[in-house]
Image (cartoon, rainbow, N blue to C red):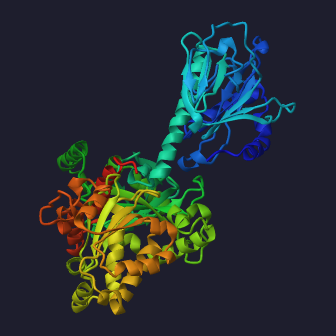
Amino acid sequence: MRVCDLCVRQLIQKRAGYRSSRTSKDMDNSSGKAASLQSQNASEISNVNVKAESDEDEKARCVSNGRGITRDSQMSNSEPMAIASDENAEKNESESLCGILYSCILEEQANIMDEILYLGTFRMAGHSFASRSMSANVALWKDRMFMLTPAELLCFKNSEDTTALGEVRTCIHLTDILHVEVNDQFPRILTIVRSDGRFCRLRAKTAEQCAEIRQVLNRARAMFEDAMHRLHRGIRPNDFCISCVTIQHESSLPETVVASSPAFGDRLQVDMYPSSILRFYVNGPYANGMALVSSETLVDVNGAIGKDVVVESETLCTAPSDQGVLYTHIRSTQLHCDSSIEFWSLGVWGLYISLTLAFHLQNHSLFVPMTCALIMSSFVWRNPLPLSLMAATRRLQHVSRFQVVCTRIVAGPTENDTADSPVSDAEVDARFVEACGGDMEEAKRRYKQTLNWRMEHNMDNALLRPLAHFSIMKQAHANYIHKRGKKGHLVTFEHLGSMKASREHWLRHGISEKDAIMYHMISQEFLWRVLDPRPFPNGTQIKVVDLQGISMADVGGEVFAYMKTLGQTVAEYNPERIFFMIVLNPPSWFSLIWKLVSPLVDPKTRERVQVLRGEKDIARGLLECIDEENLPQQYGGTCQCEGGCISGSPEEKDFHEYMAKVNAGEECADVLEALCAKYRFIVDDFEV
């Protein structure tokens, strides 16, 4: 995540003229532009010109303006904000960092510490400092140029070339900053405490400017930490938002705002004509877009009661380059369009009719034109838009009123993301890199193969499709999810001793091996999409395999071939999901087979397998990683789930209830999202 010095220098050289000093006229011309750009900024990027203390009498000030950056560029972009100095720029905008900064960088404070810079006795990272008294006579302040990027604070040496910055002298990553403080006794000196015990101090012209610099630094640190947190925890629904909803009835008419920053679920009432376009400006962590909705689309949505219509967003040209697009889920209900006339209009009509009858004006030659004019006037006064719309489209259009709700926004692949499109290193899931031992080419091949397989089987919507044989497979296979381990890992139990009878059971019900494997893959989807969606190295399970009752007949022939295919499929498309595997109650002949097979098993996988026999050893081994109240009683724990641990654990109950709703034909997108939110809250409490 560190900004490369070479890249920074290249950016600096490209914008060298942009940072050169400007006249007051130039600065006046740019002040309006700076104000507009300031409102678009998503993070603070500052470039501060630092003068020596000997030049203190020189009257110079800094005016800042910036270029907006989007959220996903907070870790990679380092476009600087130019700060120009000028004698006549005495009064600057409140958002600017005005004044002259002085700096002193202390590299070896244990040996050389200026008395004026010492603010107390500290002990940090092995560095110990002796107490010294403050003295304003001892200070070696250097002429420095500082730049604050979204990830680093850079300090540059002086350069003879006034149009460019010098060599990078010090680079302080924002993760390296432990604390930013201003001492009450020296309000113009800002102290940056680094994680290795060193200090970086900046001396501002005024105390107010010093306090403002502190705010900017703390704000940049908070943004960076928030971005890092989002990167590690993965995408969540609250990372998406709607910035604005607008409507445009015709291309030549202005675009008007319907709602600004509406929340998901907010009901928006809009009047749509056949030529109207409703625009949702949507934002995500990696892309921004605009979803276009026509009146025909809203009619189609209204016809699909309780279902969402998904609109693919057009990627905005100002958004960062991204491999995915945003999909906006919309519901609408058509409302009765009130066409009643206002009371004042009724009064006018009443007066007109009374005068007509009183003076017998119905026979007058102007009666018909006046009546038509009054009808048109009433219509126009009530709503002036149809006339302008009719003038623009040259046709009369009927209005329809809708209540529109945006339920959610999701990120997905683009239309160009085909089976043959290459995969970049950054796209590859870290689990595949780990599974391939760091071989990036092999990891990309496997990852792309997984993406193609998921696309072929539409796995992104697998949990929204009915699975008719779900109950039969649950009855046949004794595999179940049962709570969590001590460090938050999901715990799954699988009984392989009855595998032959299980296979015969679901074959009798007309379920093929392909269907049985897909049932297991959908179960995996529920595990890692709902119960524990955390990115690598989290999102793993403690797998307990009970071999009680297994025979030699179960490890040969068709049963063994099926188990081998199932294991290969799960491992191929869900790598690095095993935190630890515990094999229980192996038969006497298992040791011989394990001795023959274990040398062929990857050492990392072999280290994760533990074989336990006997009740005492089984209980002791399982209780090392699973709390007693979360371990079924049959394995030495105290858990007695209502209805039995096989189907009575909280996770299994949620899985059964959810699939029952899906198989009943209910629309379960909101139910699935609620389940995901429930378990995201649970896993956030664990630090694995």
Q: Position of residue 256 (x, y in %)?
A: 45, 48
* Residue at position x 74%, y 29% in the image: 145
Does residue 105 appear anywhere in the picture?
yes
Q: Position of residue 513 (x, y in %)?
A: 33, 87
Outermost left residue: 643
Q: Considering only vertical position in the picture, is 168 above or below 470?
A: above
Determine the image quadrant of residue 93. top right
* Residue at position x 52%, y 55% in the image: 286
Q: 606 or 224, which lies in front? A: 606
Q: Considering only vertical position in the picture, is 69 above or below 473?
A: above
* Residue at position x 57%, y 66% in the image: 437
Q: Considering only vertical position in the picture, is 134 above or below 202?
A: above
Q: Is residue 58 left or right of residue 625?
A: right
Q: Position of residue 55 (x, y in %)?
A: 79, 14
Q: Considering only vertical position in the picture, is 177 above or below 142?
A: below
Q: 181 or 394, which lies in front? A: 181
Does residue 398 appear anywhere in the picture?
no
Q: Position of residue 381 (x, y in %)?
A: 34, 46
Determine the image quadrant of residue 581. bottom left
Q: Is residue 636 left or right of residue 375?
A: left
Outermost right residue: 160
Q: Is residue 390 left or right of residue 355?
A: right
Q: How many marks?
A: 0
Determine the image quadrant of residue 665. bottom left
